[in-house]
């Protein structure tokens, strides 16, 4: 009864895995999760997966773009897609009674898209405008820089939106043989100083682990311990995150968020912060103090609080058929199975303060971070000084 509703997995003759879960809802979400993204591309064809995602809705051999849009609209359904560094996803949300029709439409757009020349040229302009919009999102820009410096010798440095060039003859972006090894020394930084900007946007990260590594769960708890905060939050000394308490009381930043970005075989664990120029130095100092605290002095009470918060966040994330479908698709690609909630909770419950200290020491203590910063960053300490903050002198 712990694993209800059950996620059933079957494999078709062509090797396609079908994972299904009956949630008993009046709406359903069905999608295709493909193990391919910008990580599979190179400088010449970067942007192809994202371009193909756009082209999927421009008509097939059976349906024109207008026919497709009218059919979806008349069903009261919703079609969407997205690409990431490792995955491309196409999905439909519809009434449960229309599930077979939604599956047929998805199969049609995936297998029979016409990739017409006129549509390609038209969509090229749309994607270029999307890129311009992304460039105004400084968090996206900083994270692209962070990947560029963290994984210098690999294709994971490539941003997810690039002006790809595609014809109907070179649409083989879903082949897996182009996958690159992501491991690279994390010992560099990218700084883009612009004193005309009002706020500095900074990310600092160490190399962590992939989804299936046993240290992923402890790093998720550590990520929750650091937490996130912005000025719109209430609270103060009672916030669960010590760094949030200090940021609130000392007016150290406008916002910060801890992140644990996982890929197949590596990851980035770190902190993104938005600061006024005069508080950068102090905010970086206290952030690194909290990192060192994870390695040396985190308490059982702090860990227990973070574990409860992590479990709550996991449950809140699974609200509705679409996030459940996304969770199933991601886990099938990452683990080749759906991990039941009770198993995840048991793995979280098994973590104690010693586990956090050991794992954080392994990945954070005396490690060389990757740093990306944009804006009025004159007061950002130089790399060697930040590097020296990655350990405490032991006596």
Image (cartoon, rainbow, N blue to C red):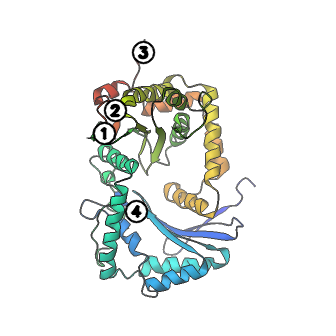
Residue 59 at what x, y percent from top left?
A: 42, 82
Given contact means CB atoms under 8 Å apart, are the residues at marks 2 and 1 in contact? yes
Where residue 84 sits, quadrant-wise, is bottom left
Residue 185 got which mark?
Answer: 1
Residue 238 at what x, y percent from top left?
A: 63, 29
- Residue 260 to residue 128: above or below: above
Given contact means CB atoms under 8 Å apart, are the residues at marks 2 and 3 in contact? no
For the N terminus, which image quadrant? bottom right
Q: Earlier in the sequence, mark 4 or mark 3?
A: 4
The secondary element bearing badge 1 is classed as loop
Q: Earlier in the sequence, mark 2 or mark 3?
A: 2
Residue 36 got which mark?
Answer: 4
- In space, the residues marked 4 and 1 are separated at their CA atoms by 24 Å
- In space, the residues marked 1 and 3 are separated at their CA atoms by 25 Å
Q: Which residue is mark 3?
A: 394
- Residue 339 to residue 276: above or below: below
Q: Earlier in the sequence, mark 4 or mark 1?
A: 4
């Amino acid at each position: 009864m712990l694993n209800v509703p059950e996620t059933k997995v079957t494999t078709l003759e062509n090797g396609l895995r079908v994972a299904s879960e009956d949630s008993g809802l009046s709406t359903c979400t069905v999608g295709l999760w493909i193990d391919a993204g910008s990580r599979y591309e190179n400088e010449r064809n970067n942007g192809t997966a994202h371009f193909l995602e756009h082209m999927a809705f421009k008509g097939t051999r059976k349906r024109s773009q207008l026919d497709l849009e009218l059919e979806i609209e008349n069903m009261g359904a919703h079609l969407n897609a997205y690409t990431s560094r490792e995955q491309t996803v196409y999905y439909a949300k519809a009434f449960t009674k229309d599930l077979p029709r939604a599956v047929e439409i998805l199969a049609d757009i995936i297998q029979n898209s016409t990739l017409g020349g006129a549509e390609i040229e038209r969509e090229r302009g749309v994607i270029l405008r999307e890129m311009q919009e992304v460039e105004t999102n400084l968090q996206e820009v900083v994270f692209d820089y962070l990947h560029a410096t963290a994984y210098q010798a690999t294709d994971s440095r490539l941003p997810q939106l690039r002006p790809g060039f595609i014809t109907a003859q070179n649409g083989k972006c879903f082949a897996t043989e182009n996958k690159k090894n992501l491991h690279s020394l994390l010992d560099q930084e990218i700084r883009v100083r612009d004193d005309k900007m009002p706020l500095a946007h900074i990310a600092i990260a160490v190399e962590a682990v992939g989804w299936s590594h046993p240290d992923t769960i402890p790093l998720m708890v550590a990520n929750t311990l650091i937490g996130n905060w912005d000025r719109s939050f209430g609270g103060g000394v009672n916030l669960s995150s010590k760094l949030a308490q200090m940021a609130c009381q000392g007016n150290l930043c406008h916002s910060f968020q801890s992140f644990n970005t996982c890929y197949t075989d590596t990851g980035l664990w770190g902190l993104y912060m938005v600061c006024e120029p005069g508080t950068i130095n102090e905010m970086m100092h206290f952030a690194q103090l909290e990192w060192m605290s994870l390695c040396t002095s985190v308490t059982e009470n702090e860990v227990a609080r973070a574990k409860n918060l992590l479990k709550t966040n996991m449950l809140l994330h699974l609200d509705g058929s679409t996030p459940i479908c996304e969770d199933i698709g991601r886990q099938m690609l990452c683990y080749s199975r759906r991990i039941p909630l009770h198993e995840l909770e048991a793995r979280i419950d098994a973590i104690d303060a010693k586990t956090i200290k050991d794992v954080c020491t392994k990945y954070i203590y005396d490690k060389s971070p990757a740093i990306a910063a944009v804006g009025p960053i004159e007061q950002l300490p130089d790399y060697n000084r930040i590097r020296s903050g990655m350990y405490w002198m032991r006596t």
